[in-house]
Image: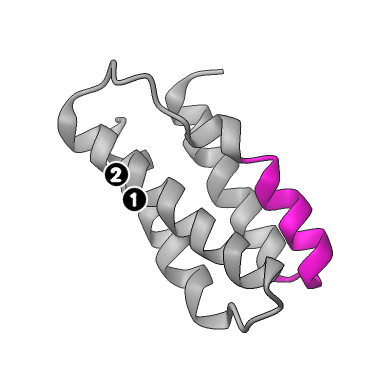
């Protein structure tokens, strides 16, 4: 899977997970971890965008795990993933 495909998968999964109950959403987010882990082979700007996406997903996961509100966390995570994808073109 290319990095562009990974970023697109992350975006689509985030959008779908946002509509799910906490347990299902958390399971979906856990499936993204491998997709957003980097190997440092990309230019710094792309790695920073990927890292921001990873951290945003972690914040949502942490909130869901603690049964805290995550409503305000989805949009920034999706935006981070979209920025990452836009840099891969």
Please report the residue visible at 37 percent of the width from the left and 19 percent of the height from the top.
39
Q: Which residue sits furthest front?
A: 66
Q: Secondary structure at mark 2?
A: helix
Which one is nearer the viewer's eye here, 63 or 89? Answer: 63
Q: Secondary structure at mark 1?
A: helix
The answer for how far apart the CA atoms under marks 2 and 1 are is 5 Å
Which one is nearer the viewer's eye here, 62 or 23? Answer: 62
Q: Quadrant of residue 46?
A: top left
Please report the residue visible at 37 percent of the width from the left and 40 percent of the height from the top.
85
Please report the residue visible at 58 percent of the width from the left and 38 percent of the height from the top.
33
**Residue 70 drawn at (x, y percent):** 59, 77
Which residue does the numbered mark 1 point to in the structure image?
52
**Residue 45 drawn at (x, y percent):** 17, 37
Which residue does the numbered mark 2 point to in the structure image?
49
**Circle 1 crowding by C-alpha within 10 Å: few under 14, some 14–19, many from 20:** many
Kindly report the secondary structure that dominates the magenta region of the rendered protein: helix
The quadrant in which the N terminus is found is top right
Q: Is residue 34 magenta?
A: no
Q: Are marks 2 and 1 in contact (CB under 8 Å)?
A: yes
Magenta residues, as a range? 19-32
Residue 67 appears left or right of 78: right
Residue 31 appears left or right of 76: right
- Which scheme is used to colour this image of the protein? one colour
Q: Quadrant of residue 43?
A: top left
**Circle 2 crowding by C-alpha within 10 Å: few under 14, some 14–19, many from 20:** many
């Amino acid at each position: 899977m290319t990095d562009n495909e990974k970023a697109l998968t992350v975006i689509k999964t985030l959008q779908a997970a946002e509509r799910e109950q906490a347990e299902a959403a958390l399971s979906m987010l856990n499936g993204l971890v491998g997709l957003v882990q980097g190997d440092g082979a990309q230019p710094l700007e792309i790695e920073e965008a990927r890292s921001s996406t990873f951290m945003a997903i972690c914040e949502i996961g942490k909130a869901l795990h603690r049964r805290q509100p995550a409503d305000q966390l989805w949009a920034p995570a999706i935006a981070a993933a979209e920025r990452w994808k836009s840099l891969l073109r």
